[in-house]
Amino acid sequence: MTATTPTTPTSTEKTGARTEAAADVITGARERIDALDDRIIGLVQERMAISAVIQDARIASGGRRVNLSREMEILTHYSEALGKPGTSLAMTLLELCRGRI
Ligand SMILES: O=C(O)C(=O)C[C@]1(C(=O)O)C=C[C@@H](O)C=C1
């Protein structure tokens, strides 16, 4: 058996590109996606906190955690903007914000 020294992956190996130029484009674009994902996660966390304020106020007043007519508005908003996957995204957001029902 021959021992092989581990090598650092090249930029083309890391990106799947076949040229250095394409690898550079992909690496730059991935940095922007990572920054956007951080912002999206922050926005989701902010949405969860605001949703909790609403739910707590409703429950403290004697109401229920869930408000299905409002959820329908949100599902429609996302599906009109993003199509069928938008509905799934809205359902995931609602689950993050109020838990499973
Ligand atoms: O808008 C409300 O009434 C909320 O409670 C917020 C929210 C949401 O996260 O968007 C959460 C639970 C409800 O079922 C509906 C919507």
Image (cartoon, grey):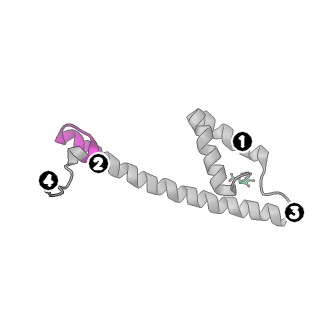
Instruction: Report x, y in % for residue 48.
Output: 63, 59
Q: Pointer 1 and pointer 4: residues touching (CB < 8 Å)?
A: no
Which residue is rendered at x = 23% and y = 45% of the image? 13
Q: In this view, does 23 lie to the left or right of 100?
A: left
Whether residue 22 is in magenta: the answer is yes
| Pointer 1 residue | 73
Q: What stretch is highlighted in magenta?
A: 14-27
Counting residues from the start of the chain, the first of labels 1 and 3 encountered is 3
Q: Work out how far the residue at label 3 is from the one at label 4, CA to CA, in angstroms.
A: 72 Å
Q: Residue 62 carries which label?
A: 3
Disc 1 vs disc 4: which is toward the camera?
4
Q: Which mark is residue 27?
A: none
| Pointer 2 residue | 28
Disc 4 vs disc 2: which is toward the camera?
4
Which residue is rendered at x = 80% and y = 61% of the image? 58
Counting residues from the start of the chain, the first of labels 1 and 2 encountered is 2
> Dot 4: within a 10 Å radius of its alpha carbon, few (fewer than 14), some, or many (20 or more) residues?
few
**For this rendering, which residue is in front, 2 or 44?**
2
* Three-letter amino acid code of the residue under disc 4: Met
Query: Under 8 Å from ligand 1: the CB of mark 4?
Result: no
Q: Work out how far the residue at label 1 is from the one at label 2, CA to CA, in angstroms.
A: 37 Å
Secondary structure under the numbered disc 1 in the rendered image: helix
